Image (cartoon, rainbow, N blue to C red):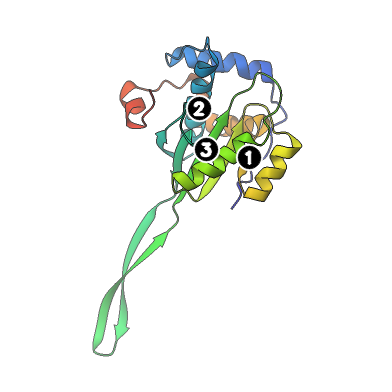
C-alpha cells in the first residue's frame, strides 16, 4: 500500500528552511552542522506525523540507523471475542483483527536540489530491518525522476516538500507543528538524543 498524499501549492523552500530553524531552536537542536539540520528535520517530520494521528515508536536517526530515521505506526491490533454455534451449544472464539500498519520513515533534508534514489534504498532496507509493513522516504524538497522510479519499483512511498506542506496544514488544525515543543520525557520515550 503506497501512501497517497495530495500536494499543497503553497510550498516555499526558503520559508520552510526558516521555520525549521525556529523549530530546532525551540527544541534545543543546534543546526549549525548538517547533522543538526538532519536531526531537526527528523524530529519535525515525527511531529507532523504525530499530529496527523501516527504513533511515534522510535526516532532512530543519525549514522548507522540502517535506513530507519523514524519508526511509527497507525491503527491497532484488536482481539474480538464472539460466541459461535457448536454442536453442543455456544463456544467463545477469539479473533484477532489487525489494522496496524508499521512504517519505516527515511528523512532527507536539502536546502535545495532533489533527493535521488538513496533515500528510497535506505527506506527499503529499514523496512526490512525494523520489520515494518511500509517504507516511506521524505524529502524537504522533492525526488529526482530516478528516485521516483526506484520508489515505484521498491513500493516505497514518497513524501516531497509540497506533500509535507499539505500534512503540515492538516496537522495545524490540531496544533501548529512549527511551534510544537517536545518534552525531555517524550524525547527519551522515542529514543531521540
> Which circle marks residue 42 in the picture?
2
Distance between the Cα atoms at labels 3 and 2? 9 Å
Residue occupying the point 50% across, 35% down: 49
Residue occupying the point 63% across, 49% down: 154
User: Which quarter of the figure has residue 170?
Assistant: top right
Quarter of the image where the C terminus is located = top left
**Image height of 118 relative to 82, above or below:** above
Kindly state the secondary structure of the residue where label 3 is placed.
Answer: strand
Kindly state the secondary structure of the residue where label 2 is placed.
Answer: helix
- Among the two numbered marks 1 and 3 on one chain, the one whose residue lies closer to the N terminus: 3
* Residue occupied by mark 1: 158
Q: Using the rendered image of the protein, determine whether residue 99 is visible from the camera's viewpoint.
A: yes
Out of 158 and 91, give the one closest to the viewer.
158
- Which residue, as the protein is rendered here, is positioned at the far top? 32
Tally of marks = 3
* Residue occupied by mark 3: 105
Kindly state the secondary structure of the residue where label 1 is placed.
Answer: strand
- Which residue, as the protein is rendered here, is positioned at the far front? 64
Distance between the Cα atoms at labels 2 and 1? 15 Å
Amino acid at each position: 500500500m503506497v501512501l497517497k498524499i495530495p500536494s499543497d501549492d503553497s510550498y516555499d523552500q526558503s520559508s520552510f528552511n526558516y521555520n525549521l530553524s525556529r523549530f530546532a531552536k525551540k527544541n534545543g537542536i543546534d543546526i549549525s552542522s548538517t547533522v543538526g539540520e538532519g536531526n531537526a528535520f527528523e524530529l519535525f517530520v515525527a511531529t507532523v506525523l504525530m499530529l496527523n494521528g501516527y504513533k511515534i515508536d522510535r526516532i532512530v536517526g543519525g549514522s548507522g540507523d540502517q535506513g530507519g530515521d523514524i519508526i511509527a505506526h497507525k491503527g491497532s491490533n484488536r482481539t474480538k471475542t464472539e460466541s459461535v454455534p457448536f454442536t453442543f451449544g455456544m463456544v467463545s472464539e477469539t479473533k484477532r483483527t489487525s489494522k496496524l500498519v508499521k512504517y519505516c520513515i527515511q528523512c532527507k533534508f536539502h536546502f535545495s536540489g532533489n533527493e535521488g534514489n538513496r533515500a528510497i534504498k535506505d527506506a527499503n532496507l529499514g523496512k526490512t530491518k525494523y520489520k515494518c509493513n511500509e517504507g516511506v522516504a521524505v524529502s524537504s524538497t522533492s525526488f529526482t525522476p530516478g528516485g521516483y522510479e526506484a520508489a515505484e519499483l521498491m513500493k516505497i512511498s514518497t513524501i516531497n516538500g509540497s506533500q509535507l506542506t499539505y500534512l503540515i496544514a492538516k496537522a495545524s488544525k490540531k496544533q501548529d507543528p512549527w511551534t510544537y515543543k517536545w518534552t525531555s520525557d517524550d524525547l527519551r520515550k522515542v529514543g531521540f538524543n
